[in-house]
Amino acid sequence: MANIPAISNGVLGVNTSAFEAITQASIVVQITLLILVSLSVFCWAVGFTKYKQFRDLDASNSRFLAHFWKSTSLDSLFESLDDYRGSNIARVFKAGFLEMQKLAESASGNEQTIMQLSGIDNLERTLRKSIDLEMAAMESRLTLLATTGSTGPFIGLFGTVWGIMGSFHKIGTMGSASLAVVAPGISEALIATAIGLAAAIPAVVLYNNFVAKVRKEELELNTFSSDFLNITKRNFFKES
């Protein structure tokens, strides 16, 4: 049986609480709200994991860079990489060092000078590829935040439009535009708008914050790559 508005002292009472509006909303609006809530939950989960990821990256990179600039041997530094598994700069160094080993093993006799001239290009490509892989790892799942931030208000607007349509339908069915008739539909429509904004605004804030952190990490990776190339050029790629 449909809920009948309560009448007290000759006044028609309409229950327009948020919970009642959601439970009595149409199935389309309820599905819309479920989608928005699910997106919001996923966004907060991504935000938590990304925060932890960047926090660990900063700590590991700081420790590795301190060791890198104090180290007098790249070989000994390479052997200690297991202590810096959380550092993306350490992984870039590992890729570059392994490429240097391959170039050293391929060098022989009179061909060494030619190898050195092309070897730097190989090393640069290896470092660039390693940085690209690290960038892809840092940017993973950020599309969910961007998608929620851009589509959340429109998904909520869809629920809003549907709720208002329901109100007009009731007006036409009952032949009355009283508050008791239009209030439930208007209430669920406004709730859809509110939840859409509640899902989108944090997603946009998180996305912008993490994009800034990704750009900062990219700068640090490129800076380390340049420093590493300068060191190797001075010490390992001198023409004979």
Image (tube, grey):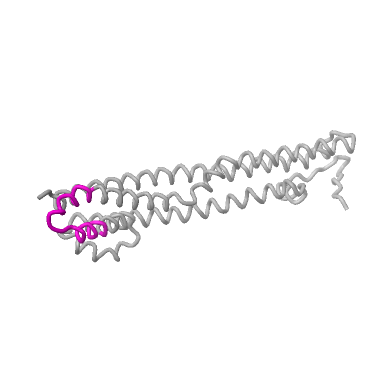
- Left or right placement of residue 56 versus residue 40 in this view: left
Quadrant of the rendered image containing residue 108:
bottom left
- Left or right placement of residue 213 versus residue 114 in this view: right
**Which residue is drawn at the image coordinates 15% and 54% (left, top)?**
112
Q: Which residues are magenta?
A: 98-120
- Left or right placement of residue 91 versus residue 195 in this view: left
Q: Does residue 227 sit above or below 169 in this rendering?
A: below
Q: Position of residue 142 (x, y in %)?
A: 48, 48
Q: Does residue 199 sit above or below 87 in this rendering?
A: above
**Which residue is drawn at the image coordinates 77% and 49% (left, top)?**
24
**Which residue is drawn at the image coordinates 44% and 44% (left, top)?**
209
Determine the residue located farthest toward the front in the rendered image.
110
Q: Position of residue 30 (x, y in %)?
A: 72, 49
Q: Position of residue 57 (x, y in %)?
A: 35, 55
- Please identify the dominant SS of the magenta region: helix
- Left or right placement of residue 10 versus residue 45 in this view: right
Viewer-proximal residue among 24 and 29: 29
Residue 104 covered by magenta stretch: yes
